[in-house]
Image (tube, helix red, strand yellow):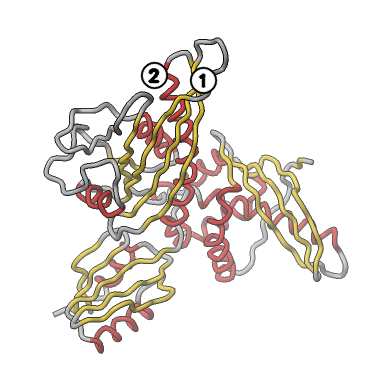
């Protein structure tokens, strides 16, 4: 049964609201498969709870529904605005958006509900007007800070029907190639979700770059080429097409495309996502059938990759800090400085110390740039190197 949204969000204290929201936002990555999108709306499954007071289950049920719808709107906001922007502008978003959650919910249906230990829990499927939400966030000047979506380079080797070898644009001294169907489909999907795409100008190989010349890329090899081309993420993999079973006495052919892909972060080589998909096409034209099958496989792969990348890129993250020219005692002082003076630091892990160099991993709610800016601004240390997830620091002279 579908309902029109009629609830309004509640307003607890600002600090408590922010803490609750951050905990929810960090865990909402796990709910990404429960999100489906159309052009101007997004369908989200979310769960709300409320305490049953004075045995009034009916009131608790209404409050649980209100809580679930508010969380659905919070998830929708999380797909539009970066984690840093959410933290920095929580109060204005809370005042203007979350307290008016019902204004962004077109309708909802109840998936399940239950009472347990004095608590009423409701799980809903809400249709959120993401177009209206985007317009209002844009009017508040928040979309300009959107997710700082990373620059993505695609390195997809493709073997079409009847081909004996894979084609790929980074082939050393290879002929100029048109963009592959796999890369074209992935590029379109990533652009539609707000990512920036690095386009290769010549498509005839990568002159002067060190990297594997074959179709079987490694993460390190893909990252090295991505770094040289100023990409932040490289999506690499393979796609191949084979003939499907015949459908009787007909000229319509069946084409099966299988695609596998991984996404690797360029600055530290971390694997952010992996996905695979199969596409099937039936067409009278071999060329068209081949391309359609690859495109359908790519749509499945792109959905998996973008969901995983968005969760890891925009949410709370781990950055690596390398300390240079500091003995162990000074490294301990730096860790205290980081914890007490730099905003957004959650935890610090020392991974290695050798001579005058220390490797740290830091869990933060802010971007690496914000952390680097704070370190530099406070003057005690110098930032000598920086990328999206890696910072190099020396003691100030």
Q: Is residue 183 above or below residue 43?
A: above
User: CB under 8 Å between callouts 1 and 2?
Assistant: no
Q: Which residue extends farthest right?
A: 55
Q: Is residue 215 above or below residue 118?
A: above
Secondary structure, mark 2, is helix
Please state which of residues 69 and 297 is positioned toward the viewer in this rendering: 297
Q: Is residue 16 above or below residue 161?
A: below
Specify the quadrant of the image occupied by residue 20.
bottom right
Q: Position of residue 113 (x, y in %)?
A: 78, 55
Specify few, some or many for label 1: CA neighbours under 10 Å numbering under 14, 14-19, or 20 or more: some
Give me the disc on residue 282.
Answer: 1
Q: Which residue extends farthest bottom?
A: 329
Q: Position of residue 71 (x, y in %)?
A: 62, 55
Give me the disc on residue 174.
Answer: none
Q: Earlier in the sequence, mark 1 or mark 2?
A: 1
Give me the disc on residue 287.
Answer: 2
Q: Residue at x 44, y 54 (%)?
A: 82
Secondary structure, mark 1, is strand
In the figure, is residue 135 to the left or right of 236?
right
Q: Position of residue 112 (x, y in %)?
A: 77, 52
Specify few, some or many for label 2: CA neighbours under 10 Å numbering under 14, 14-19, or 20 or more: few
Q: Which residue extends farthest left?
A: 208
Q: Residue at x 72, y 53 (%)?
A: 123
Please state which of residues 173 and 364 is positioned toward the viewer in this rendering: 173
Q: Residue at x 55, y 44 (%)?
A: 133
In the figure, is residue 145 to the left or right of 52?
left
How far apart, in angstroms, are the residues tagged by discs 1 and 2?
11 Å
Please state which of residues 152 and 346 is positioned toward the viewer in this rendering: 152
Specify the quadrant of the image occupied by residue 286.
top left
Quadrant (top left/top right/bottom left/bottom right) for the N terminus: top right
Q: Position of residue 254 (x, y in %)?
A: 50, 21
């Amino acid at each position: 049964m579908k309902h029109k949204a009629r609830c309004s969000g509640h307003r607890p204290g600002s600090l408590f609201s922010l803490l609750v929201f951050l905990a929810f936002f960090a865990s909402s990555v796990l709910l990404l498969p429960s999100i489906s999108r159309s052009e101007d709306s997004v369908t989200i499954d979310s769960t709300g709870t409320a305490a049953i007071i004075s045995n009034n289950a009916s009131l608790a049920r209404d409050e649980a529904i209100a809580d679930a719808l508010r969380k659905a709107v919070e998830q929708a906001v999380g797909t539009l605005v970066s984690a840093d922007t959410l933290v920095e502008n929580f109060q204005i978003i809370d005042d203007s958006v979350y307290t008016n959650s019902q204004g962004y919910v077109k309708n909802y249906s109840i998936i399940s509900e239950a009472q347990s230990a004095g608590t009423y829990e409701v799980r809903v499927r809400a249709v959120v007007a993401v177009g209206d939400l985007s317009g209002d966030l844009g009017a508040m000047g928040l979309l300009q800070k959107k997710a700082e979506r990373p620059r993505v380079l695609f390195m997809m080797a493709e073997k079409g029907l009847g081909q004996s070898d894979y084609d790929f644009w980074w082939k050393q001294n290879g002929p100029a190639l048109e963009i592959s169907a796999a890369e074209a489909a992935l590029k379109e999907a990533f652009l539609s979700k707000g990512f920036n795409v690095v386009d290769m100008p010549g498509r005839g190989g990568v002159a002067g770059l060190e990297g594997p010349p074959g179709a079987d890329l490694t993460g390190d090899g893909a990252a090295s080429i991505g770094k040289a081309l100023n990409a932040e993420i490289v999506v690499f993999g393979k796609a191949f097409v084979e003939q499907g079973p015949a459908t009787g006495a007909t000229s319509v052919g069946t084409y099966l495309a299988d695609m596998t892909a991984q996404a690797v972060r360029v600055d530290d080589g971390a694997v952010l996502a992996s996905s695979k998909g199969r596409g099937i096409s039936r067409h009278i034209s071999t060329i068209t059938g081949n391309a359609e099958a690859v495109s359908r496989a790519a749509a499945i792969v792109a959905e998996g990759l973008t969901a995983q990348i968005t969760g890891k890129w925009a949410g709370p993250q781990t950055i690596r800090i390398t300390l240079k020219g500091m003995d162990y005692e000074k490294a301990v002082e730096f860790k205290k400085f980081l914890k007490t003076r730099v905003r957004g630091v959650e935890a610090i892990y020392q991974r290695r110390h050798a001579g005058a160099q220390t490797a740290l991993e830091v869990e933060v709610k802010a971007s690496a740039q914000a952390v680097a800016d704070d370190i530099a601004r406070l003057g005690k240390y110098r930032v000598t190197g920086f990328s999206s997830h890696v910072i190099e620091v020396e003691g100030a002279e």
